[in-house]
Amino acid sequence: MQEITLKTADAELLGTFFKNLGAEALARFTPHSISPAALREVCTDPSDARLVAVDADGVPVAYAVLREIARPVPELLIAAAEPGCGYGTRMLELVKAYAREQNKTALRASVEPDNMRAHRLLGHHGFTQIGFTGGMNLLLLCDLRENPTPRGKLPEVSREYVLRTGNRCIFRSLCADDGERLDAFFRQLDKKGRAFFTPHDLTRPFLETLCRDTAADINADRFIVTDTDGRIAGYVFLSALQSPLPSMGIGTAEWARGEGLGREMLRFIQNRARAYGLHAMRLSTHLTNYTAQKLYKTSGFEVIGTTSFGELLMLCDLGRVD
Ligand SMILES: CC(C)(COP(=O)(O)OP(=O)(O)OC[C@H]1O[C@@H](n2cnc3c(N)ncnc32)[C@H](O)[C@@H]1OP(=O)(O)O)[C@@H](O)C(=O)NCCC(=O)NCCS
């Protein structure tokens, strides 16, 4: 394979690339219209990065779009003009290096389930499936970090918090002896609450162990809000803390709902994520959990697909919320 060089796309290079693209690839790869006027227009759009790889003769052999390059997890669309020549592999390496230079820690991509060639290529380059996109394409995520240093746990938290009703609470890190409290919290949730909020095993032995091991767990950071009787009013956590895209979970006790605690806990965990140096995080929520979705959508989350369990998968760009 000839060495290829990455260039910023222009309408002329893209016109030649799409003219050379085979019918099958053209049918699968439709990042935008390809009329000369449309190509001139897309090349002036600053929100996406458009990269063309050219061979030694200056012929464009691969094209990649990084949609919304300013966002923390841009979406990658990629195509190579001559399948089987290794251009796709080399292009992917160049694009990943480019994304790292832009300080991105992760990329996402969507692939049709029957597109074995693209699936294999992305799979060999660190893309793993995290769910599905709206059209039932596979949703893949790539960790761009090379030998990432483990994120150390931030100091524990303990502060007073007053509910809208005036009731005083303590907002604090989960402790080793909170097992019974956490068990009581999950027990008081009604059937719907339990259906919507099952972030992990809810058996008493599991909850005891979870609490006992919480301080040493480098993959999760967990918090509760307790009232003056020690009852848990809210539970919020960050998990998959060592991954490029950690996730979060949140739940409020039945008796503490609608008092602003959910929004407060969400704001807290977003700030905590920022303190870990994160630029984005994800969550999953039941398709019919409209109350939670309203909270998330008004707090910087957007839907990016569904999980393999059929839940909505949402992403929060932490740079876009206070
Ligand atoms: C989702 C949940 C965490 C919200 O907690 P909360 O303490 O009631 O939330 P808040 O009082 O801060 O309200 C936050 C937002 O939720 C929405 N909301 C709250 N109660 C609502 C209701 N009864 N109907 C519709 N929307 C409601 C509103 O958008 C509200 O914002 P606003 O008051 O600024 O309009 C809580 O309902 C809950 O624990 N549900 C069960 C477990 C669960 O679903 N967890 C999420 C799993 S993904």
Image: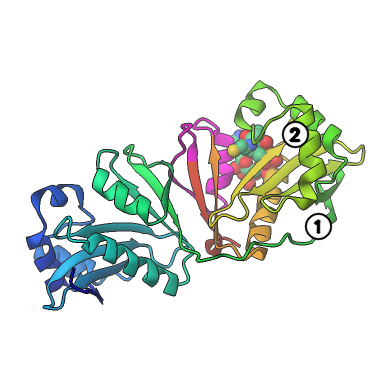
Q: How is the image coloured?
A: rainbow
Q: Can you name the residue that lies furthest to the front here?
A: 1
**Residue drawn at (43%, 74%) of the image:** 101
Q: Is residue 290 left or right of residue 132?
A: right
Mark seen at residue 156: 1
| Amino acid type indicated by mark 2 | Ala
| Amino acid type indicated by mark 1 | Glu
Estimate how packed mark 1 is, as few (under 14), some (14 to 19) or many (20 or more) residues with alpha carbons within 10 Å: few
* C-alpha span from label 1 to label 2: 22 Å
Is ligand 1 closer than 8 angstroms to the Cβ of mark 2? yes
Magenta span: 286-312
The image quarter containing residue 293 is: top right
Which one is nearer the viewer's eye here, 107 or 287? 107
Question: Dividing the image into 4 quarters, which one contains the C terminus?
Answer: bottom right
Compared to residue 10, the image places residue 292 above or below, namely above
Q: Secondary structure at mark 2?
A: loop
Q: Secondary structure at mark 1?
A: loop
Compared to residue 97, the image places residue 156 above or below, namely above
**Residue drawn at (69%, 47%) of the image:** 237
Query: Mark 1, mark 2: which one is toward the viewer?
Result: 1
**Residue 278: x, y in percent?**
59, 62
Asked if the residues shown at circle 1 and circle 2 are in contact, with their CB atoms under 8 angstroms apart, the answer is no
**Residue 171: x, y in percent?**
81, 50
Which one is nearer the viewer's eye here, 25 or 300? 25
- Residue at the disc numbered 2: 253
